[in-house]
């Protein structure tokens, strides 16, 4: 999914215009006072409307991704004042939701209320932990979000390009704001682990090459629409170059030097979130937020150990099936090093991904009654970020913005991109994984726009991992190597449960986590190292995949047992995805009701995979 936000400039007048990116306090107060005071149904809709508008106006980058008009010329206000104002406004929204008379809401609005209240409560609880003081990591931050947003903006008219120029001109202020937060974080001992920051200066400098035309920031000016007269195109390019040379170069150079001279030397050498001030509670909150379960880190660690043992047993069977003469370690070394499993050109790798995606598309109607209308494409991860980026990721599209969904595949370092992982990866990131689920949610006409844009990690990533298991039904995993690749990806997410909790809760070292990962998967050392460093800067996020998958598999098993011959896989998938992304606790209640509606006498509770794993 898309990651980020950005902004900058030094003059007082431009900072004043930047501050307008937050929802104006007077506008918020006016809208808040106008909320209905009696009818609960009307109150809820008005609260949802205000919350949605608040997000779009406070985070203009999100508005760009959503195709919400009127805010493409600005960035979020990430000054301390802007952040405090957003937190206070969020508390006020929570207070309004808490005071709403839930008992009088119509049944069809109960879910809307539950989601709104739960989201606001979780957000407010998170304010006690200073996540905002580490706004930049090697995985996220303005050095990655700025070009992503710029290149996602509409660019059909002169007015679109005027918006791009306005955003470029306001970028130095965001750099200034970001550095201020980083400096404050250093003073309070809140930084990413020092070991993870080694590539950050290169990422920043990649935005400002000597040749401005090669900068990701000016990519949108390289090929402009024919509808714009050539003279106007030339004028727009010249203005962009002027902003680049006069404002962007010094701003980004200054940030790179700050990172090299101050931030990396001053960053925390410890790797665990639990080593930060109030770190154990902070990690517990991150786990709760990302998994939407009440499982403790210790319980999740035990689930991970049990899943690793189970999947390892399946892997051993595949090794025997392949006729390989050797043990697990020898087989994984064979998969990592044999030339037959690797491409020799970036173009060939990308072409094969596109071929897999096309083959999958033709099989989807057998598993889904409803398919999204929004198309998707397969593109390489941009060169400026590929070296420290994961194997692949998905960026949602937007019909309103005129943008397709994109499956970004990493074509860097071809010896670390084996062919046997490609089918499972495509199923996860594109169809029927992220693109199908997110595009369907976006196209839900009968739910509020606020819900259509909400992404719960455990649901979204749990669905992506569950989708990998559908590869067999889609005609994939025909040879033992691709089948082992699918198990490798399942193992990858199981290992996450062990190493994430191991490092952040149980005192594991980074080297111990890398060794455990290498011992239990066929992924190359480069990928493993990138993954471990990802878990260090996004504590708890990686736990959502396997826990979400286990819950979805549990719900499917329950439906199959209760409905027996009446079970319909297409109906199950449509029901699971039909309300958009949901927290795990709310999803389970919804699917239990669906099972009963299909003719089951009772939605009998079965022992869940998570419970079984915990017991093991």
Image: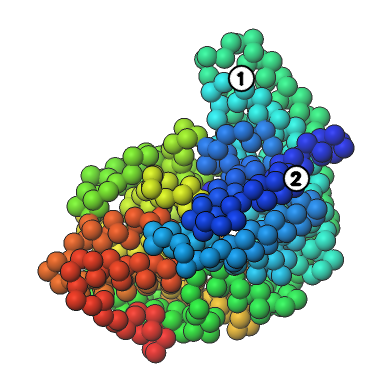
Foreground pick, 164 / 139? 164
Q: Residues within 10 Å of mark 2 (few under 14, many from 20)?
A: few
Furthest residue toward bottom? 615
Is residue 456 visible in this depiction of the protein? no
Q: Picture coordinates of residue 541 (x, y %)?
A: 54, 66
Quadrant (top left, top right, bottom left, bottom right) of the C terminus: bottom left
From the top left corner, tell me how far across and down residue 225 is, in percent.
53, 19
The label on residue 468 is none
Q: Is residue 309 above or below residue 226?
A: below
- Point out which mark residue 158 bears: 1
Total labels drawn = 2
The outermost residue toward the left is 565
Name the quadrant containing residue 94: bottom right
User: Can you give x and y, in whole percent of width and height, for residue 438 in the image?
Assistant: 42, 50
Residue name at image x 40 percent, y 39 percent: 377
Q: Read off the residue under disc 2.
A: 26
Q: Is residue 155 visible?
A: yes
Could you say which is closer to the camera, residue 189 or residue 197? 189
**Splitting the image into 4 quarters, where does residue 110 fall?**
bottom left
Residue drawn at (81%, 29%) of the image? 246
Most extreme residue toward the right is: 12
Say whether residue 593 is left or right of residue 435.
Answer: left
* Rendered position, 470 above or below 412: below
Q: Where does the image place residue 164, in percent across and percent down from the top left?
A: 65, 30
| Of 53 and 350, the residue lying toward us | 53
Q: Residue furthest front?
A: 38
Q: Secondary structure at mark 2?
A: helix
Mark 1 against mark 2, which lies toward the viewer? 2
Element at label 1: helix
Residue 467 lies left or right of residue 104; in this view the side is left
Residue in the image at 53% along x and 23% along y: 156
């Amino acid at each position: 999914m898309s990651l980020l936000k950005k902004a900058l400039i030094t003059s007082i007048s431009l900072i004043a215009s930047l501050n307008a990116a937050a929802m104006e306090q007077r506008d918020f107060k006016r809208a808040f006072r106008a909320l209905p005071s009696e009818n609960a149904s009307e109150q809820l809709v008005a609260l949802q409307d205000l919350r949605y508008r608040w997000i779009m106006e406070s985070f203009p980058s999100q508005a760009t991704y959503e195709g919400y008009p009127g805010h493409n010329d600005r960035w979020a206000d990430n000054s301390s004042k802007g952040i405090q104002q957003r937190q206070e406004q969020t508390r006020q929204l929570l207070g309004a939701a808490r005071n709403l008379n839930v008992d009088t809401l119509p049944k069809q609005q109960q879910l809307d209320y539950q989601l709104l209240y739960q989201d606001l409560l979780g957000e407010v609880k998170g304010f006690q932990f200073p996540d905002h003081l580490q706004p930049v990591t090697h995985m996220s931050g303005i050095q990655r979000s700025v070009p992503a947003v710029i290149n996602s903006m509409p660019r059909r008219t002169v007015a679109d390009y005027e918006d791009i120029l306005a955003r470029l001109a306001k970028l130095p202020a965001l750099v200034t704001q970001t550095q201020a937060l980083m400096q404050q974080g250093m003073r309070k001992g809140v930084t990413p682990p020092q070991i993870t920051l080694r590539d950050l200066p290169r990422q920043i400098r990649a935005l400002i090459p000597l040749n401005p035309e090669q900068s990701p920031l000016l990519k949108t000016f390289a090929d402009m629409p024919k509808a714009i007269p050539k003279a106007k195109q030339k004028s727009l390019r010249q203005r962009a170059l002027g902003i680049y040379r006069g404002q962007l170069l010094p701003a980004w150079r200054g940030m790179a030097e700050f990172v090299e001279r101050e931030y990396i030397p001053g960053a925390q050498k410890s790797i665990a979130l639990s080593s930060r001030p109030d770190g154990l509670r902070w990690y517990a909150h991150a786990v709760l937020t990302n998994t939407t379960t009440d499982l403790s880190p210790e319980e999740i660690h035990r689930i991970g150990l049990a899943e690793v043992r189970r999947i390892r047993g399946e892997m051993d069977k595949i090794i025997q099936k392949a006729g390989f003469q050797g043990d697990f370690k020898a087989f994984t070394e064979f998969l990592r090093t044999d030339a037959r499993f690797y491409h020799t050109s970036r173009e060939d790798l990308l072409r094969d991904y596109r071929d897999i995606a096309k083959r999958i598309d033709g099989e989807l109607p057998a598993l889904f009654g409803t398919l999204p209308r929004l198309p998707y494409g397969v593109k390489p991860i941009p060169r400026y970020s590929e070296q420290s980026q994961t194997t692949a990721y998905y960026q949602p599209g937007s019909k309103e913005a005129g943008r397709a969904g994109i499956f970004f595949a990493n074509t860097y370092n071809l010896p670390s991109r084996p062919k046997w992982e490609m089918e499972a990866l495509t199923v996860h990131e594109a169809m029927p994984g992220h693109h199908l689920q997110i595009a369907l949610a976006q196209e839900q006409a009968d739910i509020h726009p606020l819900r259509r844009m909400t992404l719960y990690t455990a649901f979204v990533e749990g669905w992506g991992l569950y989708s990998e298991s559908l590869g067999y039904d889609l005609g994939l995993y025909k040879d033992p190597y691709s089948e082992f690749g699918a198990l490798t990806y399942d193992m990858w997410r199981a290992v996450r449960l062990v190493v994430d909790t191991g490092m952040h809760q149980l005192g594991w070292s980074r080297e111990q986590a890398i060794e455990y990962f290498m011992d239990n998967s066929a992924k190359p050392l480069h990928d493993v190292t990138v993954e471990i460093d990802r878990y260090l800067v996004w504590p708890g996020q990686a736990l959502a995949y396997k826990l979400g998958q286990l819950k979805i598999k549990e719900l499917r098993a329950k439906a199959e047992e209760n409905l027996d011959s009446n079970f319909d896989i297409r109906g199950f998938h449509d029901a699971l995805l039909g309300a958009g992304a949901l927290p795990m606790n709310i999803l389970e209640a919804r699917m239990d009701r669906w099972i009963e509606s299909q003719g089951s006498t009772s939605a009998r509770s079965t022992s869940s995979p998570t419970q079984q794993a915990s017991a093991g």
